[in-house]
């Protein structure tokens, strides 16, 4: 796996490594037992400081997705792959066909991204709100929206080192 770091994206390099690793886990590119590139390898191919990669790997370890093995490297612990998202799944084929139609209709990449993000937000917004309420119900938290964001890795979440603010 080779990480592609976009320095103009506004997303921290370590977070890009985390996101790209999660995407690879979701698509089944990385499987349990696979070894991630070493921090030195990532530094050579992506021109990031080795500590940036280590920070990303610690975040993934905190989430239970990878595990370091002393002297051997960092290995995938569990997958995020769903059979419905596999390369040969009907859903993926339908999406590919839709993308072909969007392209044929003259939509540019950014147009398609905006359209997908909009529909994604519409379809999953209710689910996210229901999840926040469930979290509030369980924990009796009157600030469920903000607290739920920190668990979802939203703008206020995903702190390096996994520290939570004291209650």
Image (cartoon, rainbow, N blue to C red):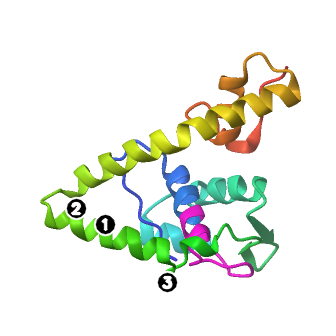
Q: Are marks 2 and 1 in contact (CB under 8 Å)?
A: yes
Q: How many angstroms separate mark 3 from mark 1 (CA)?
A: 15 Å
Q: Is residue 119 left or right of residue 149?
A: left
Q: Of marks 3 and 2, which one's residue comes earlier in the chain? A: 3
- Say what secondary structure mark 1 lies in: helix
- Most common secondary structure along the magenta stretch: loop
Q: Is residue 3 magenta?
A: no
Q: For the residue carrying disc 2, how many other residues have a C-alpha within 10 Å: few (<14), some (14-19), or many (20+)?
A: some
Q: Is residue 164 visible?
A: no
Q: Of marks 3 and 1, which one's residue comes earlier in the chain? A: 3
| Residue 42, position as x, y percentages in the image | 52, 69
Closest to the observer: 64 or 40?
64
Q: Residue at x 73, y 28 (%)?
A: 133
- Say what secondary structure mark 2 lies in: helix
Q: Is residue 37 above or below residue 141?
A: below
Q: Which residue is mark 3?
A: 88
Q: Which residue is mark 2?
A: 102
The quarter of the picture where residue 21 lies is: bottom right
Closest to the observer: 124 or 45?
124
| Residue 157, position as x, y percentages in the image | 64, 35
Q: Which residue is mark 1?
A: 98
Q: Which range is magenta?
A: 22-37
Q: Is residue 49 above or below residue 97?
A: above
Q: Is residue 26 magenta?
A: yes
Q: Is residue 138 left or right of residue 58?
A: right
């Amino acid at each position: 796996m080779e990480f592609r770091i976009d320095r103009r994206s506004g997303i921290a390099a370590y977070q890009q490594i985390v996101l790209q690793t999660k995407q690879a886990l979701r698509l089944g590119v990385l499987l349990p037992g696979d070894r991630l590139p070493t921090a030195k390898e990532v530094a050579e191919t992506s021109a990031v400081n080795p500590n940036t990669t280590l920070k990303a790997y610690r975040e993934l370890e905190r989430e239970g997705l990878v595990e370091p093995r002393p002297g051997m490297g960092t290995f995938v612990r569990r997958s995020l792959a769903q059979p419905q998202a596999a390369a040969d799944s009907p859903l993926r084929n339908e999406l590919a066909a839709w993308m072909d139609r969007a392209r044929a209709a003259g939509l540019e990449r950014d147009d398609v991204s905006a359209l997908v993000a909009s529909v994604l937000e519409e379809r999953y917004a209710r689910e996210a709100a229901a999840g926040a309420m469930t979290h509030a119900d369980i924990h009796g938290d009157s600030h469920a929206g903000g607290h739920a964001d920190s668990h979802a890795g939203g703008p206020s979440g995903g702190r390096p080192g996994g520290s939570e603010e004291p209650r």
